[in-house]
Image (spheres, helix red, strand yellow):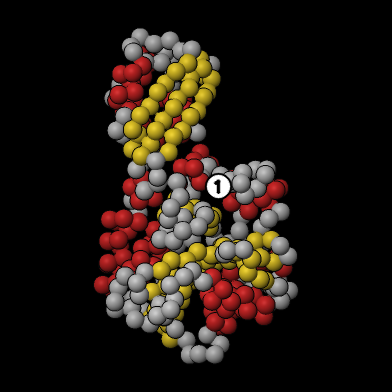
Amino acid sequence: MKYIKTRWNIPYYNMAFENYVMNNDDFKDDYVFFYIHSPSIIVGKHQNTIEEINSKYVKDNDIIVARRNTGGGAVYHDEGNLNFSFITTKKEDENEIDFKKYTLPIINALKKLGVDAYLSGRNDILVDGKKISGNAQGLNKDKVLHHGTLMFNVNVEALVNSLNVSQMKIESKAIKSVKSRVLNIKDVLDIKMDIYQFKDFILDEIFSEMDMEEYRLTDEDYKNIEKLVKDKYGTWEFNYGYSPKFSIKNKKKFESSGLIEVMLDVKSGIIEDIKLSGDYFSVKETDELEDKIKGLNYKEDYIGSLLETIKLDDYITNIKNEEFISLLFD
């Protein structure tokens, strides 16, 4: 197994890097790498991004939203979260998801630190019934990608506020309820260490019975990964537009314009249909505004650009542009 150092703290690049190694025949060995992201939400391959995130909180706090190559649920990353990836050659009989194989080295390393960790359910590592790690996995015809999180010292309130927690996963969306289900590893360590010392310890334990050989990415590798980010992983079309078809219904009362309700149908990130209703007044027919919105990306700056070219007050008397945008996105 070889260790790869990466230089990115933006998830688009690490997602592209994983794809690059998985689908490049020049990478013939088994690899492991660790990375720490700026505040980010990483949604699963099959998830609807809009439904998984708190869009207003994400925007207000400059949280990056990226889509990964594997299934599972959305996770929050920040500088207190250590992420790891294994990319290995698939054995002939390795055609099923196997979390235990890849989480066991991590669990054993944690036990050496006095952290009584264990694998639970499909893909979580727990301590005292609380989650410290989530894992995801994917396979192609030749390789296995397994990656996971280690909550070392994560901002739990940001985690809670940035994600829309499913009612099927937790009965209450209260912060204290989510806090009761997660745990930072730093809080149960017997020794003091920062996240970088923690990373080095885990890495040393993984390679304790083998020589650690570092693989250095070439300039050509970096160039190809940058292209993947530009063409796919850093694009709105992949991170938002890739989502399945969904509908949104929202209702707000504005002091200057009245009660307004909107219903939206979005497919592949494009607004297919929109219907506005309410007790507002208008000079022009509202369906003219609806026709202008249909076909646009479901993205705030697209709607904002449209509103700069029209007189919104003609369609909904006294409403401000920012109020209309909040109706569609908050």
Please determine whether, in this image, residue 166 is positioned above or below residue 206: above
Report the residue marked by disc 1.
163
Residue at 43% over, 86% down: 213
Front-lying residue, 37 or 289: 289
Residue 322 x %, y %: 44, 27
The part of the image, by quadrant, that contains residue 12 is bottom left
Residue 32 seen in this snapshot: yes
Asked whether, in this view, residue 195 is left or right of residue 282, the answer is right
Q: Find numbered disc 1 in the image and state the secondary structure of the residue it sits on.
A: loop
Residue 330 x %, y %: 50, 33
Q: Residue furthest front?
A: 93
Residue at 35% over, 54% down: 234
Callout 1: 10 Å neighbours few (<14), some, many (20+)?
A: some
Please determine whether, in this image, residue 118 is positioned above or below residue 205: above
The part of the image, by quadrant, that contains residue 103 is bottom right
> How many numbered discs?
1
Residue at 38% over, 27% down: 274
Which amino acid lies under the numbered mark 1 shown in the image of this protein?
A: Leu
Q: Dividing the image into 4 quarters, which one contains the N terminus? A: bottom left
Residue 209 x %, y %: 54, 90
Front-lying residue, 104 or 214: 104
Please determine whether, in this image, residue 307 is positioned above or below residue 74: above
Residue 60 x %, y %: 50, 41
Front-lying residue, 167 or 11: 167
Asked whether, in this view, residue 301 is left or right of residue 133, the answer is left
Residue at 40% over, 61% down: 69
Residue 236 seen in this snapshot: no
The part of the image, by quadrant, that contains residue 198 is bottom right
